[in-house]
Image: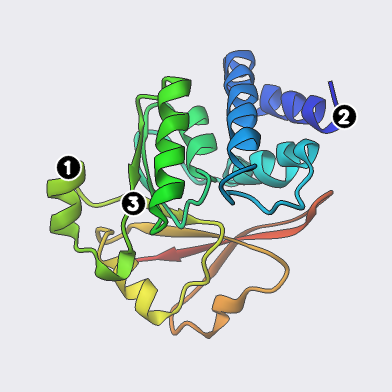
Amino acid sequence: MSVQKEAFRNYLATKVADSEWIFQQFELYHSLLTKSNTYINLLSRQTLEDDIWSLHFQDSLLPLETNIDLNNKLILDFGSGGGLPGIPLALIAPSSEVYMMDSKKKKMREVQSFINEMGLTNCYTIPERLEETKLDVLKDSYGLSSKFDLIVSRSVRIDEILLNKLFGLLPKGGKILLYKGKDIKEKDLHIPLELVLNVKKEWGERNLVLIRKI
């Protein structure tokens, strides 16, 4: 077992119950993701397979190092790509429902195949472009019962247009959690940003930024 894989296994053991079963699910996800990435660009082709354990899986679970409650929530992963951070969050918060949205239909079809292979019952895909989608359409087409409690995003820079669209999917008091690098480009938004985590990991500096719908 590689050093990074073992480190991720140990990380899980300190953060969640039933960590060994969850780790086995991550092993399956890793296998599916690396295989699919050879013909669909889900991750950078320069990413080493061992680096996925830290750069993508452990990074996706950084909300566990905050006081954000992930349980019994309706969560949207916006700009999900290969299912990150949606699938990792669904694995460690099985009481929540996680929807993954990406405009690239090929990617969402592949992520749906991951969901099927892994037997996940709390994950769903939305192959739609946010700018062209309305909440009513999401409810009718994807069975949403209500607005989302939490929206997460690792790969999209949020501007005012996107922020307003995302706010339309949240109730009052709903939250948007952004995974950012050293440079938080969303500082130009005319709304308070709450830094809930700043860490320096082996794969770089990471900031988690919270935006609340008031």
Q: Residue at x 56, y 57 (%)?
A: 154
Could you give the CA–CA distance between mark 3 and mark 1, rounded to whole angstroms?
18 Å
**Whether residue 93 can be seen here:** no
Residue under label 1, please give it.
145
Q: CA distance from mark 3 to mark 2?
A: 35 Å
Q: Where is residue 25? Give x, y as percent.
A: 57, 21
- Looking at the rendered image, the disc whose residue lies closer to the viewer, 3 or 2, is 3
Say which quadrant the N terminus sits in. top right
Residue, disc 3: 127
Within 10 Å of disc 3 (Cα), the crowding (few <14, some 14-19, many 20+) is: some
User: Which comes before the other along the chain, label 2 or label 1?
Assistant: 2
Q: Label 2 sits on what residue type?
A: Val
Query: Up-down: is 86 above or below 22?
Result: below
Please provide percent x and percent y for residue 52.
Answer: 71, 40
Element on which disc 2 rests: helix
Q: Is residue 105 above or below residue 181?
A: above
Q: Earlier in the sequence, mark 3 or mark 1?
A: 3
Q: Is the residue 95 above or below the residue 201 in the image? A: above
Determine whether the residue tagged by mark 3 lies in a helix, strand or loop. Answer: loop
